[in-house]
């Protein structure tokens, strides 16, 4: 779902003694993990610290790898945040130091003027629509903990200030049309539910709570007269419920109430106030673009002939043009719709890759977009909608690499274990092969997270390093449960079907064996978050077919994960994985969890984790590493004390990818 705007064990055994788990659990997570590390013996596994990194079992990185990787890690990308209220320039985010910060660009190919200078990455930003107000709001957390706070920045003075409480999770900030208020969600009331608030930035100490219904609610758009909000209750990837909230009366009216479970995407109010544009999969496999007539209480399907998900949508200020993207088998395609005539056209001649960050200029004739391909990092272009001409606004560095030599993947489909319509079901995947000739290429299987996500062809200098410098092929499958292939496909791994997605990896191994130029004796698996679970599950299901695995912020035990993930997201994950409070489901989740199958793993394992991860707590990584080492296996472990769900700081990320390169050299190529 697109959010517009800012947008059981009784004890843990260490190498010295056992700690009472309930006592241990009562400690803050950061202190808990650091204590665990301090108690762990360093006699068996070498442990050292480097800046914010705790490094266990990882050899010193050779200078050759550091030097080789340097150019591949010296790449940037740019993201459009917002146009100036008067159209004279744009606010973008890019990284010139450790983290992504906000910059101002006044003209195409213009100099980037950095505005924010923080140790933490700055998230989405939105300029106050009132041209007389030279301010914008942005979001930032601390240490990757994802307790985002909303801040205000004054462009004239350069001063910034905190607007929210500094403790709860806040986000999805969306300006009113007038620009005097913004609406957002916050967990301030109880730390769990996403309530909705409206704030006047001139009086941040007194935000108005406008919705307190329980569950996860977000703001999608304001009505043209700023009297109502389009809000959405998110239940799961397969179910959400849009409503209209009257800000004066508090009346909450569901749009299109039905017993059918429907997934809705982004929604925007038509400028005449008579209807709402949104995406949904009602009565269909894919999310189509629809128009909901508020008076007639019925919808019109606008893209029923496009058999793919419609993703981003953006309406011009005059309401005459709706831009949207379709995810066509993993490729982003841009369309423009004339809202008066219904005429639709596909924007031609865009490079094969991804299109995102849609943002109309105030003149309604230009559309800012970000283009990202396997050969070029994301950069900002402006499309003239009258003649489809493109003007490039940013030029991101690529470390001097000859990107025209970068490998473009091939879309393949391979048969898996079950059938669809009487034929073997096929799993889509993207295959990258090195350009250098070899009798057989070793292979890295890369599995995306989510799990309701999708691997799409994008610029990855890390992939290109594996291809160009190590001669490793990369194959990225979109196993069942992935988005982009219809809602039936999305549901195929839910609950008791969880390990069916792992069987898809087994089928991929069979396919690799049949390829004359791929080495089925040298295969590694790599993934993050849910993809980290898939790494661990693949290693214990196919112990003789994988030489190694790299797990970043992955789930190692579904029961402990569900019990310890942050309160505000626990119920959302139960919908996908199953409810651990149900005895039968709990037994199933324990049975399939990697920690309870670690004795089956034979390949070397590299685990990376952020200490402050609110999604997959660091305890998930710790218990997996202990289990592998307890069984005499090899486990490298990297913990970042100033990161959360992934590594966002450049120094940490650089070390991690250098270590990955060394790990692959030692455990896949040897």
Image (spheres, rainbow, N blue to C red):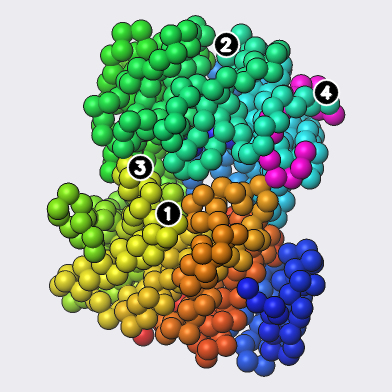
**Residue 49 visible in the snapshot:** yes
**Residue 528 visible in the snapshot:** no
| Secondary structure of residue under mark 2 | loop
Residue located beneath label 4 in the image: 203
- Residue 481 or 618: which is nearer the viewer? 481
Q: Evaluate if marks 3 and 1 touch, with contact meaning CB atoms under 8 Å apart.
A: no
How far apart are the alpha carbons under marks 4 and 1? 45 Å
Q: State whether residue 279 is above or below residue 607.
A: above
Q: Quadrant of residue 637?
A: bottom right
- Residue 179 or 574: which is nearer the viewer? 574
Question: Furthest-right residue in view?
Answer: 205
Viewer-nearest of discs 3 and 4:
3
Checking the image for residue 644, the label placed there is none
Residue located beneath label 1 in the image: 494
Q: State whether residue 68 is above or below residue 371.
A: below
Viewer-nearest of discs 2 and 4:
2
Query: How many residues crowd around disc 3 within 10 Å: few (fewer than 14), some, or many (20 or more)?
Result: many
Q: Is residue 409 magenta?
A: no
Q: Evaluate if marks 4 and 1 touch, with contact meaning CB atoms under 8 Å apart.
A: no
Q: Is residue 195 magenta?
A: yes
Q: In percent of the image, x 39 and y 17: which residue is there?
A: 299
| Secondary structure of residue under mark 1 | loop
């Amino acid at each position: 779902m697109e959010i517009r705007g800012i947008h059981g064990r009784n004890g843990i055994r260490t190498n010295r003694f056992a700690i009472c788990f309930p006592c241990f659990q009562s400690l803050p997570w950061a202190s808990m993990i650091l204590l665990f590390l301090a108690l762990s013996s360093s006699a068996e596994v070498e442990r050292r610290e480097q800046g914010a990194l705790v490094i266990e079992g990882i050899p010193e990185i050779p200078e050759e790898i550091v030097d080789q990787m340097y150019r591949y890690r010296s790449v940037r990308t740019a993201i459009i945040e917002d146009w100036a209220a008067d159209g004279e320039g744009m606010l973008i985010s890019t990284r010139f130091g450790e983290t992504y910060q906000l910059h101002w660009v006044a003209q195409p190919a213009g100099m980037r003027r950095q505005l924010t200078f923080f140790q933490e990455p700055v998230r989405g930003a939105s300029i106050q629509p009132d041209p007389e107000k030279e301010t914008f709001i942005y979001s930032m957390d601390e240490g990757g903990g994802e307790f985002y706070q909303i801040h205000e920045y004054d462009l004239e003075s350069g001063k910034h200030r905190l607007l929210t409480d500094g403790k709860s999770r806040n986000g999805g900030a969306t300006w009113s049309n007038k620009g005097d208020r913004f609406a957002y969600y916050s967990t301030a009331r109880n730390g769990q539910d996403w309530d909705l608030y409206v704030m006047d930035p001139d009086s941040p100490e007194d935000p108005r709570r406008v919705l307190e219904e329980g569950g996860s609610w977000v703001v999608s758009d304001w009505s043209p007269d700023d009297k109502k909000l389009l809000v959405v209750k998110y239940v799961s990837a397969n179910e959400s419920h849009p409503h209209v909230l009257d800000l004066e009366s508090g009346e909450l009216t569901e749009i299109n109430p039905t017993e059918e479970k429907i997934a809705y995407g982004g929604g925007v109010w038509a400028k005449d106030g008579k209807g709402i544009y949104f995406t949904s999969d009602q009565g269909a496999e894919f999310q189509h673009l629809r128009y909901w007539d508020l008076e007639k209480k019925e919808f019109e399907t606008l893209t029923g002939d496009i058999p793919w998900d419609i993703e981003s949508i953006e309406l011009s200020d005059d309401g005459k043009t709706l831009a949207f993207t379709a995810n066509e088998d993993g490729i982003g395609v841009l369309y423009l719709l004339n809202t008066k005539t219904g005429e639709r056209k596909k924007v031609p001649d865009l490079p094969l890759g991804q299109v995102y960050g849609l943002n109309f200029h105030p003149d309604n004739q230009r559309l800012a977009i970000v283009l990202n391909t396997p050969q070029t990092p994301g950069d900002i272009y402006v499309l003239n909608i009258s003649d489809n001409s493109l003007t490039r606004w940013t030029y991101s560095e690529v470390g001097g690499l000859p990107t025209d030599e970068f490998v473009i993947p091939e879309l393949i489909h391979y048969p898996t274990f079950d059938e669809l319509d009487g034929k073997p079901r096929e799993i889509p995947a993207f295959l990258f092969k090195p350009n250098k000739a070899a009798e057989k290429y070793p292979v890295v299987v890369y599995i995306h997270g989510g799990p309701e996500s999708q691997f799409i062809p994008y610029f990855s200098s890390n992939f290109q390093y594996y291809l160009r410098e190590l001669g490793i092929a990369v194959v990225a499958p979109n196993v069942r449960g992935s988005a982009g292939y219809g809602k039936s496909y999305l549901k195929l791994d839910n609950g008791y079907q969880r390990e069916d997605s792992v069987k898809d990896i087994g089928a991929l191994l069979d396919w690799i064996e049949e390829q004359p130029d791929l080495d089925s004796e040298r295969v590694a698996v790599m993934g993050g978050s849910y993809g980290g679970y898939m790494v661990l599950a693949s290693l214990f299901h196919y112990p003789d077919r994988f030489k190694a695995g790299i797990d970043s912020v992955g789930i190692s035990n579904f029961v402990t994960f569900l019990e310890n993930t942050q309160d505000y997201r626990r119920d959302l994950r139960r919908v996908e994985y199953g409810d651990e409070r149900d005895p039968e489901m709990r037994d199933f989740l324990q049975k399939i969890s990697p920690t309870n199958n670690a004795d089956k793993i034979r390949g070397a394992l590299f685990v990376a984790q952020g200490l402050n991860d609110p999604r997959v707590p660091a305890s998930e990584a710790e218990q997996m590493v202990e289990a592998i080492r307890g069984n005499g296996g090899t486990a490298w472990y990297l913990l970042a004390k100033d990161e959360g769900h992934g590594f966002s700081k450049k120094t940490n990320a650089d070390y991690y990818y250098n270590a990955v390169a060394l790990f692959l050299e030692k455990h896949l190529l040897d």
